[in-house]
Image (cartoon, grey):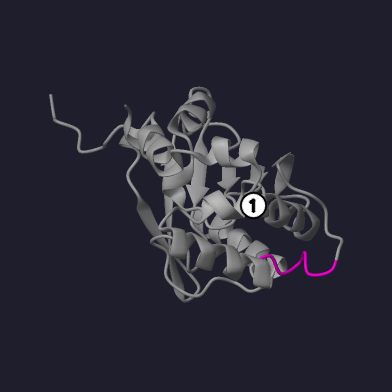
Amino acid sequence: MAESNVRPRPTTWATAPNRRIIVGSNTLVYRDLGPEDGVPLVLLAHLGATLDEWDPRFVDALARDRRVVALDLPGVGGSTGRVPGTVAAMARAAEGFVAALGLTQMDLLGFSLGGFVAQQVALDAPGLVRRLVLAGTGPAGGAGIDRPTGGAYVYWDMARATMARTDAKEFLFFPRTPRGQGGSQGLPGALARARHGP
């Protein structure tokens, strides 16, 4: 019997390798796991997040029954290029990625900034998005919300984190109240444990 060179599809986040695909002038990094059949679920992360910040327990639960694909948009994590300056440009980058993968339909989960992008993708290409899942996000609206990385507060929070020698997410995502500061304690360790186990 001949030995097969075909590798089985990864079924867990920890075993899914980073893959690369050329989209326009950029090389985007992504992970692809779970059963290959059915409508895939594409994950779009929050501001400042890379692939490594998805909780493996969450992704593994999703990938038990379906294909899950997560990506780093241009300029994020291992992806080349510059971070798009608007939500609309981020959506175009995500749409280009999906087209390069050859997907004709998907379910789309957007978390925080990823939710802004997911909503724009659904508006741009409604036939492409079967289901839209939005978590910790909002609709287009107030001044500057279409430029999530353009606010001075983002740079101020990043500078404060640098001065405090801590993860910028402590300032970006947790209120500076006793309860918020308590919730952010051990954030880098918690992220590392989620990625690599206890």
- Say left or right for 72 vs 178: left
Q: Is residue 42 above or below residue 153?
A: above
Q: Residue at x 49, y 52 (%)?
A: 71
Q: Residue 107, located in which quarter of the rendered image?
A: top right
Residue 130 appearing in the image = yes
Judged by its main secondary structure, the magenta piece is: loop
Q: Nearer the viewer, residue 178 or 21?
A: 178
Residue 102 appearing in the image = no
Q: Nearer the viewer, residue 72 or 169?
A: 169
Q: Is residue 169 above or below residue 190?
A: below
- Say left or right for 162 vs 119: left
Q: Residue 40, located in which quarter of the rendered image?
A: top right
Q: Quadrant of the N terminus?
A: top left
> How far from the left and from the top, in percent, is residue 133?
71, 38
Q: Residue furthest front?
A: 178
Q: Is residue 139 above or below residue 79?
A: above
Q: Which residue in the protein does label 1 denote?
A: 114
> How far from the left and from the top, in percent, is residue 16?
35, 39
Near mark 1 (Cα within 10 A), the count class, few <14, some 14-19 or many ≥20, is many
Q: Is residue 12 above or below residue 138?
A: above
Which residues fall within the magenta stretch? Answer: 143-148
Amino acid beneath label 1? Gly
Q: Residue at x 77, y 64 (%)?
A: 145
> How far from the left and from the top, in percent, is residue 36?
47, 34
Confirm whether the magenta stretch covers residue 176: no
> How far from the left and from the top, in percent, is residue 110?
66, 46
Tally of numbered tags: 1
- Say left or right for 145 vs 97: right
- Say left or right for 6 vs 124: left
> Secondary structure beneath disc 1?
helix
